[in-house]
Amino acid sequence: MPERTPYIAANWKMNKTVAEAAEFVDALLPLIAATQCDVVLCPSFIALNEVVERRRGTAVRVAAQNMHEEDAGAFTGEISAPMLVELDVEAVVLGHSERRQFFGETDEALARKVPAALGADLEPILCVGETEAARDGGETKAVLERQLQIDLAAVDSIDLARIVVAYEPIWAIGTGRVATPEQAQDACAFIRDVLRMRGAAANEIRILYGGSVKPANAAEILAKPDVDGALVGGAALDPVDFAAIVEAAR
Ligand code: PEP
């Protein structure tokens, strides 16, 4: 089985001004200088340029938190893949549950966004995950399978290995209620199986867990064989906490 480089991403959501983002990067870089992990920062659109410039010459990568599927047009308030690429942004979070829940992001839109990102050479970080009701109803796998089938419907199997998938159970995001390492492992292994059935080189795909990851629980979750990293929200707002999670991924 190929070694998968651990992947730790900081989703700042609607937090940090440009000045605060700059301060974070300056504090983080010396703390993670020796890491072998892929470290990705996901600032707001307006802080992307500052973060890209501050991390130049380092291995830290930068992702947007969303994008529109069209390259240009009458879509007021939206940002396109070519705009992100022009800034040297390398990746984009797609389908975060907050976008699905509060901004009407649909799987059908994601089916257009994922290929648009790949076409622009942006690495999609595709988020999938079930509600608490779906988990309690025993529907977790059905939900994950449906999301993956629709969101990736237009992606050729050869290109699936260019995608990062984040398993983010909605009941664990921002709640302090983390999935058990076994729940995270089961879901990530299932996602890998679904991707394999789609013809992907599934052993090469990074599958992350996200949902209340903290320095205190990261190592146990990241030790699971199918959990290749973490998408971190709240604990990624503090450079020391985030660096501790990066350290836990080694
Ligand atoms: C997230 O925003 O993707 C997330 C996982 O948030 P938190 O770590 O705060 O639960």
Image (spheres, rainbow, N blue to C red):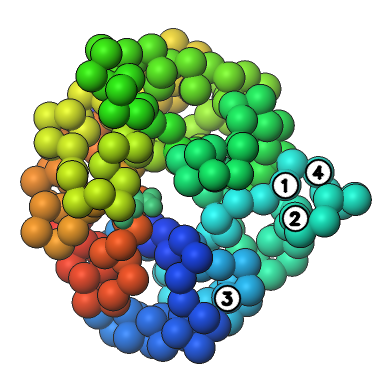
Return the x and y of residue 157 as percentages of the image width and height.
57, 21
Residue at which label 3 appears? 47
In the drawing, does residue 231 fall left or right of residue 63?
A: left
Q: Name the N-terminal-most of marks 4 and 2.
A: 4
Whether the residues at callouts 2 and 1 have beta carbons within 8 Å, the answer is yes
Residue situated in front as seen by the camera: 184 or 75: 75
Circle 4: is it few (<14), some (14-19), or many (20+) Cα within 10 Å?
some
In the rendered view, tell whether residue 249 sits above or below residue 100.
Answer: below
Residue at which label 1 appears? 68
Q: Name the N-terminal-most of marks 3 and 1.
A: 3
Residue situated in front as seen by the camera: 16 or 193: 16
Q: Name the N-terminal-most of marks 3 and 2.
A: 3
The part of the image, by quadrant, that contains residue 187 is: top left
Residue at which label 2 appears? 78
User: Furthest-right residue in view?
Assistant: 74
In the rendered view, tell whether residue 217 sits above or below residue 114.
Answer: below
Residue at which label 4 appears? 70
